[in-house]
Amino acid sequence: KQEVTQIPAALSVPEGENLVLNCSFTDSAIYNLQWFRQDPGKGLTSLLLIQSSQREQTSGRLNASLDKSSGRSTLYIAASQPGDSATYLCAVIRHNAGNMLTFGGGTRLMVKP
Amino acid sequence: NAGVTQTPKFQVLKTGQSMTLQCAQDMNHEYMSWYRQDPGMGLRLIHYSVGAGITDQGEVPNGYNVSRSTTEDFPLRLLSAAPSQTSVYFCASSYGTAKETQYFGPGTRLLVL
């Protein structure tokens, strides 16, 4: 059974800091890994999708890496802003599981002005 | 494109009542799914559909029914609501393969008394 863990569960940083969110998964037989953002009381917004054959993806100030063999992914946020405050979720799709996403518990990020 | 839309945004039910949560997408996606999000449990897959006329169970299907008569719509039915079904429900969609980005709706908050 695939298990996805995100560390830390919560993080508070001052504005302008670069930060790293961690995601680990137990079964390396995955198709892809997706990072989402969730604002309080809102739905999930897709940030980045990394295919299993890729090592990283970038979008603006966000960079996500994937090390499938070690079961790890990181989301790097450069020059954090108060508007980045949200919960960040990672999810994987493993082989033989259709399109089912297995989610981590999320990291709740607060960026203080 | 409106993306993935869900109605209602919030609903209160009494135990034993029935209701249908609506989900629609205008992106011509083949794959649609329903997740529930609970504190401490994360997001879990309830049911999914790989195309019109085809549905299957996810991790937590008990107490829920689905059907897919069109590509656009994927309603979730609670036949006899129970307090354990108090949750936030999200609908998601993507193109057919497991390698595609999944897009989520804004969610429906359900309270069963």
Image (tube, coloured by chain):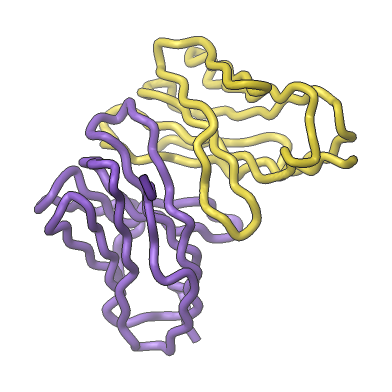
Chain colours: A yellow, B purple
What is the quadrant of the N terminus of chain B in the image?
top left
Give how far across and how far down residue A66 sits, in percent.
53, 16
Left or right of residue A24, residue B20 in this image: left
Q: x, y percentage for residue A28?
A: 43, 21
- Toward which corner of the image does residue B101 lie, by quadrant? top left
Q: Is residue A70 above or below residue A46?
A: above
Residue depicted at 32% across the width and 44% down the height: B93
Determine the residue located farthest toward the left in the rendered image.
B53
Q: Report x, y in % for residue A106.
A: 62, 43
In the image, A76: left or right of B64?
Answer: right
Residue beneath the point at 28% across and 48% down: B26
* Position of B85 relative to B80 (above/below): above
Quarter-of-image position of residue A60: top right
Residue at point 23%, 42% (across, down): B28
- Camera-side residue of A33 and A41: A41
Residue A53: x, y in percent? Answer: 40, 11
